[in-house]
Amino acid sequence: MNAPLPIRPTPLYLQDDSHPQARVCAACEVRRSALFGALDAASLDRIHTHIATPQLGPDERIFGRGDPGGAVYTVRSGIVRFERVTEGGDRRIVRLAGRGDLIGQEALLQRPYADEAVACTEVQLCRIPRTLVDQLGRGENALLLELMRRWQQALEQAEAWVADLATGSALRRVLKLLALLDRHADEQGLIWLPRREDMGAMLDMTVETASRMVSRLRRDGAIVPLPPRHARLDRDRLAAVLASQDAA
């Protein structure tokens, strides 16, 4: 079993510009698109609690299915996957989250986490205690509206996952997955390329089928795998192949 996620909290006092966590939050590149981007400076000044900024390596666990939900997390960088095991014992990856996404929303309802959250790449997080969100939510309509928007966004992502990644031909599912991963490309335009077993767990296909589809796209020049687990996409080629699949 993986060791619990280390928490190294630092008090956040935005009224003191010299405070290390205040500098981190002020310089955060995803703050405006993250949960607290809905708050104005006066509201942020009221924060007197502990916020942690854990960093994880690939395959490190953030929280487990059934763990008590004590905090939500903003993904500052990297990609997180959500796993569960079916009644038949099959491992399934049910969604991904990337830069700026809020995860662990079950905690806001004082429920245990529904899925196991695992880092796919190196990941930076902002851990926000549920009690802090409760505190700031009192009288903060902007924050409550932002939370509602993020619940709706999570619902739409789950519906799109089922519609795009769990149906259709194997090649179409792989193409849709690559298009999704392209939204989380890094500064060099590279995507994280899942291991074939992870791809199979996402797309409900065998490892062999996933490998064949990637090999086909590689031969066609649509994807160029790069070590250790990245790839460069030819977006025009991918779009053309996807269009032909949708027209079939």
Image (cartoon, rainbow, N blue to C red):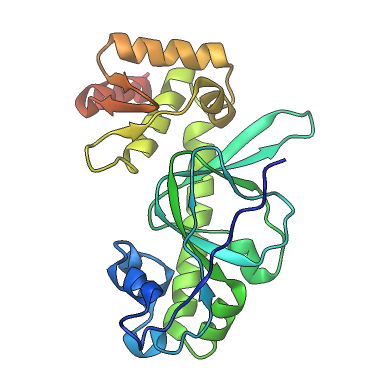
In the rendered image, residue 138, in percent from the top left (x then y), is placed at 54, 88
- Residue furthest toward the right? 87
Check the picture and name the quadrant holding the C terminus.
Answer: top left
Question: 126 left or right of 86?
Answer: left
Q: Nearer the viewer, residue 247 or 35?
A: 35
Residue 241, above or below 75: above
Check the image and report above or below for 83 versus 47: above
**Residue at x-position 38% and y-position 38%:** 180
> Is 77 displayed left or right of 220 in the figure?
right
Kindly indicate the quadrant of the structure image that contains residue 227: top left
Asked where in the image residue 213 lies, by quadrant, the reply is top left
Q: Pick the residue in front: 151 or 22.
A: 22
Query: Residue 57 placed where, x, y %?
Result: 49, 42
Residue at x 36% of width, y 25% of height = 246
Quarter holding the N terminus? top right
Q: Residue at x 29, y 62 (%)?
A: 29
Residue 113, horizontal then vertical, whole percent? 67, 56
**What residue appears at the point 54 percent right and 28 percent down from the top-left corner?**
198
Image: 61 above or below 178: below
Tell me where residue 50 appears, x and y as whole percent: 53, 76
